[in-house]
Amino acid sequence: MDRRTFIQAVGALPLADAAPTPARAADFDPAEQSIAALQQQLGAGTLSSERLVAAYQERIRRYDQAGPRLRSVLTLNPGAAAAARALDAERRAGRLRGPLHGIPILIKDNVETSDHMATTAGSLALARSFRPADAPLAARLRAAGAVVLGKTNLSEWANFRSTHSCSGWSGLGGQTGNAYASDRNPSGSSSGSGAAAAASLCAAAIGTETNGSILSPSSVNGLVGLKPTKGLVSGTGVVPISPRQDTAGPMGRTVADVALLAAAMAERPLGFGAHGQDLEAFRLRGVRIGVMPVAKGSHPEAPRLYAEARRVFEREGAVLVDLKPPAAFAEMDEPEFEALLYEFKASLNDYLATLDPAQVPSRTLADLIAFNRAHAAEELPVFGQEIFELAEARGPLTDSAYQQALATLARCADRDGLAALLASEGVELLLAPGNGPADRIDEVWGDRRGDGGWSAIASAAAIAGYPSLAVPGGQIRGLPVGIVLVGRRDQDGLLLQVGRAFERAAGARMPPKLSA
């Protein structure tokens, strides 16, 4: 049974290869337009939200379903045009919800929405999981005026199914391609959100991260991506890996766009430190930044780009302090994986129990393992489910092995890791190279490089709940490479200010060259 036959059999909504409504879109191209630029046109009456929705749908048809066939959009929202019309009517009546009013966004398909779109985590097992309410983060974005254009493809189960997975592949959506070269890896589990935002298939997108799944696809797709302080954005209504580490965050083409979405999603104000709250007025002069070295396994040209980024910071007046990675960082990987195995089993079993059994017969992780075996042709043609099986073998969260893993992580990622670095020589935040350039998609070996070139401070921030930000840092042979900033908890606003100052001075992002 092929994918389309399966989807039709279970009654799921059309996926990204269903034809969008192209009405009144041909004369407007939103490519590379910022949210502020779109708002200016919406406010002037030269553009409507309904027309903007149609324009993005046309780009999805041209570049996601045809042309390079990025396969980044898993499901289109059948109610998007109606939502846009309602917001246009509010605008005409003088009722504006804020800077996101009428702006179309895409949301990763592990975040629940109340539209007639299933929340699937990319799995055929959840293909009919229609949820009665928005996740709080989606509700906040909608209340702020955003139009949910659709849901993005992702690495199935947020890339926590196999030790040899291909990032961007799911049983429902197939393989997502990188926006800059469709045969290249889109990286992380927020792969569809990254490729879609980079290709201007939406104004911006929402991803989720457990470790690297916002920052890494942002880096290799030439985007800005914010992994917020843990707890800043509600995790309710998100298909879980680890309630301790999981967080949703915005991904966009500019820092300003990401900041707008972050402010709308956040449950409390963004932290800006002692430098005021103005994004554009902020300057780097006198800001002390701890600089981490280029990681082992990086591309040979990465040091050159990183040196250029350092020069930008220095030219703008930042004080750069070279720091060495703490020895404790070398201890993070094994206890993190062990903790995630325990947390995934417990939290996923709890989540599945909340779903409608008529829509999702699988009630436990063990049921999902059996489902995948029964549908191996659709679910296991590229890689297996070794992580599922390892997690199923774990016991309850009271096990001593789990408790020991947590204690080790608290020490090596936080106390002897990021906390120690941020206490060094008065630094306010940390800088490291990001990911990239993207590897080719390899269905035989999967993601062979693993975390080669990925900075330990990014992983430590994910584990310990510190905020982190990816910003475009240049290109290597036409493929994007990012930089990563990590700050203290609840200093998300300061990260955005520093990221914007670098973005303004470096001008490093170049859009992908798409051909229909």
Image: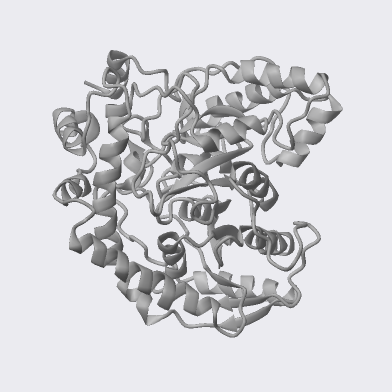
Residue drawn at x 37%, y 63% is 451
Q: Image point 22% across, 30% down: which residue?
A: 363
Q: Residue furthest right?
A: 44
Name of the residue lying farthest toward the front: 398
Q: With 215 as the anchor, is 255 left or right in this view?
A: right
Q: In which quarter of the image is the C terminus?
A: top right
- At which x and y percent is residue 332? 33, 69
Left or right relative to 253: residue 93: right
Residue 147's x, y, as percent? 62, 27
Colouring style: one colour
Place of residue 10 in the rendered image (x, y in percent of width and height, measured from the top left): 29, 16
In the image, 330 versus 54, the foreground residue is 330
Quadrant housing residue 503: bottom right
Q: Where is residue 389 in the image (x, y as percent from the top left)?
A: 16, 46
Say which residue appears at 52% left-offset and 74% top-offset: 303
Instruction: Residue 143: name its quadrant.
Output: top right
414 versus 5 height, above or below: below
Indicate whether 503 appears above or below 159.
below
Residue 263 in sight in this render: yes
Closest to the observer, 483 or 446:
483
